[in-house]
Amino acid sequence: MSDFVPYLHEVFRAFGTISTTRMFGGHGVYHDGLMFGLVADDVLYLKADDESRQAFAERGLEPFEYVKNGKPMKMSYCMAPEEIYEDENAAREWAALAFAAAMRGKKKSKKRR
């Protein structure tokens, strides 16, 4: 494992405590037990939804994509902006945006049950 995943604890220090868990060849990034980030090949992707996706799109931040049965599949995670690694306020803001999307997703899944 590279130093990238452990480094995220420092990046998001101003946002709050995070945890990371290995999954599917990458890592999930969690806050308060909710996944708001995904790491694949040392690239961080943040949770996005209909309310927040435009903020990522305006910055040209592409969604995470993988290939399944020969077809590209896009997930609801978009690449994190580079400035979060140098600016703790930016890291906190983008983490809050992603965590809010994760919270909204959690509420929607409860309604379906």
Image: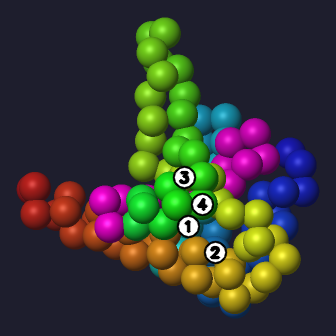
Residue at 73% across / 49% down in the picture? 43
Q: Please state the horizontal and vertical placement of residue 90, each as a whole percent of the image.
A: 68, 81
Residue with the mark numbered 2: 18
Q: Dividing the image into 4 quarters, which one contains the C terminus?
A: bottom left
- Residue type (three-letter) at the residue carrying disc 2: Ile
The residue indicated by pointer 3 is 78
| Residue positioned most to the top | 70
The residue sitting at 45% across, 36% down in the picture is 74
Which stretch did the figure color magenta?
34-51
User: Which dot marks residue 59?
Assistant: 4
Residues under labels 2 and 3: Cα distance? 18 Å
Question: Does 45 appear in magenta?
Answer: yes
Residues at circles 2 and 3 in contact by the CB criterion of under 8 Å: no
The three-letter code of the residue at mark 1 reads Tyr
Determine the CA span between mark 3 and mark 4. Answer: 11 Å
Q: In which quarter of the image is the N terminus?
A: top right
Q: What's the colour scheme?
A: rainbow
